[in-house]
Each structure stands twice: as structure tokens, then as C-alpha cells.
Image (cartoon, helix red, strand yellow):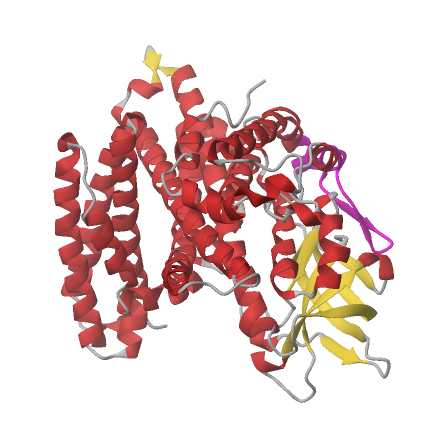
Amino acid sequence: MANFYTDNPDLKHHLSHPLMEKIVELKERNYTDADKFDHAPVNYEDAMDSYDKVLEIVGDICGGKIAENAEGVDHEGPKVENGRVTYAPGTQENLELCKKAGLMGMAMPRRLGGLNFPITPYIMAADIVSRADAGFENLWGLQDCAETIYEFADEDQKQRYIPRVCQGETMSMDLTEPDAGSDLQSVMLKATKKEDGTWVLNGVKRFITNGDSDIHLVLARSEEGTKDGRGLSMFIYDKRNGGVDVRRIENKMGIKGSPTCELTYKNAPAELCGSPRLGLIKYVMALMNGARLGIAAQSVGISERAYREALAYAKDRKQFGKAIIEFPAVYEMLAVIKAKLDASRALLYETSRFVDIYKIYDDIAKERTLTPEERKEAKYYSKLADACTPLVKGMGSEYCNQNTYDCIQIHGGSGFMKDYACERIYRDARITSIYEGTTQLQVVAAIRHVTTGTYLSLIKEYEAKAVKPELQWIHDALVAMTARYEEAVKTVTEANDNAYADFMARRLVEMAGVIIMSYLLLSDATRNDSFTHSAEVYAKLAQAEVSKHADFIANFKPEQINAYKA
């Protein structure tokens, strides 16, 4: 039986990144929790040992039962009866294993029953779970919603709800409605304040992942007469209080173990979370940043599984007297899958480190005043997190889809059959570039970091770092790519044409993305020889992508957009 953590040395490489020492020291408040909690670490080495041991447990459970149950869960799926959801038997077993192992509420503070993990090792666990079963990750990973309660709810709500999540109760975020998909400003679920000061919710939510969860975060319209985001507030709904029924479970292409529900709210009692009117403007934005990172981790985990399935099949399958991995058409495809996997994972953990630092500083600021240097650092990492979360979600999910497609192709006709896991993995992958904001919406979120220079500044920071002499050619190629990227940005921005800029946004974001990921892989290869091949392969891919987009922009006139319109 495989252990999905110990059999993948790439994970330990990212966990041991030099920036982790700073993250852990901040998260542990210089290890002062050791005086109050028996299992709190006393130093950096002790903390890293704790993360390592917990991730080994995650890897063992995932490589064992969760992976074994995945196929059965995909076939059986959850069911709804009398307004309640029953999980597939394999899902129930998975949840029970995770509860018993204490793998819920990983990122929550110890005082509330959590493990006090930074975001990075928690995201690593999500990566591992997704490799085992992407649908189950949607249940297990929604524990991340507790972060919103921790950040914005009052102390009484934190004390009542977060320990329940840490003990294994499930969560959901109820945002989408039949007439409000990506346009959350159109949410109309009504929140009414009663004379006694309590709230009730009425309306319908749709496409809600794990919609029959124990604890819900609900976006609702609390301000009478409003029609935009300023009239929306965030609420906490407790299933024990009743008032919400599951009308139906969607019959989906993939991630079938995760119930996607349509919910009806009928005078459902709820509690205001945080301040009124900030539901979309502040709280959902914070929630979505975490969700982007979670889907990026899911995408990487699926890519990891796709690569391993494709590699194993290519080694085993023989045609024309030899294993198909010996044919250039196949070994090139495998090398590209691995390069895209390694590139997206490098960006995933770089982004998780950025998120870690700014979130920890935000938390420290509730305890004491930050120093001027700390405020400056918090602002810097907050901007990088804001820039990189849409980038890693958008590009990581697209690579996930490409990798599972190529995994099927390597399997040939067998890959089209349900006898092989790649068929399920391919279906599971498809949603990653759609939910929690489509790739197109990630471009909308990312493009301002092209025009304001956030990505270019980050690229220049990476450019200044030393590399191994034998990898200098990659560095030199990236400098040339950056010059073409700068020229393309200048061409688009100087045109002063909004429609033209919107049309070119995807190309500019992708150029920035492939350059950043190339530099991250170059850094990985400088630290660890095992990444050299991926760094070389990905650099060649990046050259082709930058050249393609730069040429398109250079040879395109704004008025030519009309040819693309229906």
C-alpha cells in the first residue's frame, strides 16, 4: 500500500523551503504556545517534525482507504431522501478515518481545537487528498471555511463553531443561486431581521458543494431595496436548527462523491457573521482567495495522479515489440505532463507561502500593533498573494485538464474505458477550471497585476537570484522572454483601448504566468537536481508560449477584434 506523502519527495522539497522558517516562527509566536499546550512545538525543527508526521498520516490514509474507495464512491455517489443527503459508504468511511486521525481543522488555533498549521502544510495535505480522490477533497477541504469564521466572526461564534469543525463536522459556503452564478452581486436569498434581533433566511441556493453540511456560510441580501453587493451580508447557519432542505443533488460529470445541492431556505434561523453589508465586498473576497488556493491544490493533486497513471501504463504497455515509453511521441508527452505538474506545484507552494505570511500578520495585528517594518512586509505579501492566487488557480487548473487529457491519450483506447482510473480522473479534472471562478474570471482578477507591474516586479526579483552555471541558459532565455513580455504589455496599454486590452488580457496573464513558473522551477532545480529535467522542458514550453503571444499582439490591430464577434 502506497503512502502518498512519503512516495513523493517533491512535497518534502517544498515543505523545506527557506521561507518556511519565518512562516513557522510567526505562526507559533516565537513558540510561546509550548508553555500552554502539550503538543505545541518548542522550535522550528520540532514544528517541521510535527508537520512531517501529520502529513505522513494523511499520505497513509490517502494511499490506502481513500484511494481504494474512490472508484466505488464514483459509481455509487451520494443520495438525497426527505431533504437530507446520505454519503456513499466509501465517503462515510473516509470522513470517519479523517476524524479519528484528527485531520479536521488543521489550520485552526490550538485554543479552538485545531493543529495550528500554517496554510502551506495544510495545502500540501489537500494536494495529497486530491491525488487519492478529488471528490472527497471537496468535503474534507471545506474545513477551510472555518477560516472565515475565525477571521470575521465574534469570539462567541468562534468558540461555538470552530471546535465543532475541528472535531469533524462538515462545512459549506452557500453563495451561488439559479440567477446568480459568477455574478454574486445578483444574490437574492433574503435575510430578514426579526423584532427580537435574530435573523431568518428565505430563498434558494444552487450548485452548493456539500450542501447538507453541518455548518453553512451563507451570502444573503440583508438590506431591503438594494440590488448590488452593498446590500449583502454573511451569515452562519447551523443545520441543527432546521429550515433548510436539499431539493436535489446535481447529476455531474465528475467529482461524483461530493454532493452538489440545490437548497431551499424556509425561515431558516441564522447568525450574522461580522458586520452587515460586507458579505460580498469583504468576506466573500477573503473566502474566494482561500478557495482559489484550494482548487489549485486539487488541480495539482489530480495532475500528480494523471502523471503516475500515464507513466505506469507507458512502461507496461508494449507495441511493436517494445514499451510505448520508448517512443518519442510518448516520452515527450510524459515529460510535458511532468513539467506542467512541477511548474503548477512550484507556483502553488510559492503562493501558499505568500498567503501564509500576510494572513499571520493580519492575525498578529489583532493581538498587538504591528511595527512599521511588519506592516510594510504584510502589505507586500498581501499584494503578492492577491496577484498569485488567480494565477495559480487559472493556470494550475488548465494544466490539470491538459494533463488528464494527455493521460487518456497515452492509454489510447483503454483510457476511454472505465476499467482504468484515468477515465474518472479526466472527468474529475474538468470542473477545476470552472468552479470558484472560471479561468476567464481569474484573468479578470489577474490582469491588473500585469498593468500595475506586480508580476514584472516579482519576475525581476527572481531574475536577480543566483542559479547553477549549467542552468544559466534558462536564466538567459527568461531574461529575453521578459523583454518580450514588457514590450507586449507596453503595446496593449499604450493603445488606450479597453476592449482591445480585455481581448489581450489572457495572453498577457499567461505570459507572466509561464515566466514566473519557469523561474520557480529554475530555483527548484538550483536547490534540487531532481527538478532539472522539468526546468529544462518547461523553459522550452515557456519560450514557445511567450513567442506565440508576443507575435500575436505585435501583429494585431485593435479593429481586428470585430472578426471575433458573433
Q: Position of residue 25 (x, y in %)?
A: 47, 44
346 horizontally vs 460: left or right: right
Q: Can you tell which quarter of the image residue 493 is in?
A: bottom left
Q: Quadrant of the N terminus?
A: top right
Residue at the farthest bottom position: 225
Q: Residue at x 45, y 26 (%)?
A: 8
Q: Is residue 323 above or below residue 386?
A: above
Q: Can you tell which quarter of the image residue 103 is in?
A: top right
Q: Position of residue 543 (x, y in %)?
A: 19, 46
Q: Is residue 210 above or below residue 489?
A: above
Q: Quadrant of the C terminus?
A: bottom left
Q: Residue at x 25, y 44 (%)?
A: 519
Q: Can you tell which quarter of the image residue 219 is in?
A: bottom right
Q: Judge by depth and name the residue closer to the eye, 564 or 1.
A: 1
Q: Judge by depth and name the residue closer to the eye, 477 or 78.
A: 477
Q: Position of residue 478 (x, y in %)?
A: 17, 47
171 horizontally vs 425: left or right: right
446 horizontally vs 466: left or right: right
| Range drawn in magenta | 71-93
User: Tag count in the figure?
Assistant: 0
Q: Is residue 317 above or below residue 488?
A: above
Q: Is residue 189 above or below residue 418?
A: below
Is residue 109 rendered magenta in the image?
no
Is residue 84 rendered magenta in the image?
yes
Q: Is residue 504 visible?
A: no
Q: Position of residue 180 (x, y in %)?
A: 60, 71
Residue at the farthest front position: 35
Q: Judge by depth and name the residue closer to the eye, 71 or 12.
A: 12
Q: Is residue 238 visible?
A: yes
